[in-house]
Image (spheres, rainbow, N blue to C red):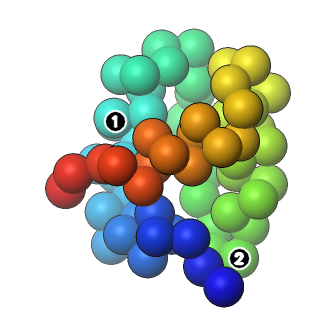
Amino acid sequence: MSKPWQDKAKGNWNIAKGKLKQEWGELTDDDLDYKEGKEDELLGRIQKRTGESKSRINEFLDDLKY
């Protein structure tokens, strides 16, 4: 079952990337390389770089406004 942010991200990933970088400036384009079906890997890269919990990252992504 997909998370709400996954459906939104498919069409708006460039916008989401910009907002993630605003929230966590240490993220790079390589950290935010989105591939469909690899969402858990993406969350792991963000978590490793920022030290945030996966639940906090999911919450941030779910709350994004496009």
Q: Residue at x 50, y 46 (%)?
A: 59
Q: Say whether residue 50 is left or right of residue 20.
A: right
Q: Say whether residue 46 is left or right of residue 48.
A: left
Q: Which residue is mark 2?
A: 37
- Outermost residue to the left: 66
- Residue 56 seen by the camera: yes
Q: Residue at x 59, y 36 (%)?
A: 56
Q: Secondary structure at mark 2?
A: loop
**Residue 29 in the image, given as x and y percentages of width and height:** 55, 36
Q: Which residue is mark 1?
A: 18
Q: Quadrant of the N terminus?
A: bottom right
Q: Which mark is residue 31?
A: none
- Residue 49 seen by the camera: no
**Residue 54 in the image, given as x and y percentages of width and height:** 71, 42
Q: Quadrant of residue 41?
A: bottom right
Q: Quadrant of the C terminus?
A: bottom left
Q: Say whether residue 47 is left or right of residue 29.
A: right
Q: Say whether residue 29 is left or right of residue 45.
A: left
Q: Are marks 2 and 1 in contact (CB under 8 Å)?
A: no
Q: Residue at x 76, y 59 (%)?
A: 40
Q: Secondary structure at mark 1?
A: helix
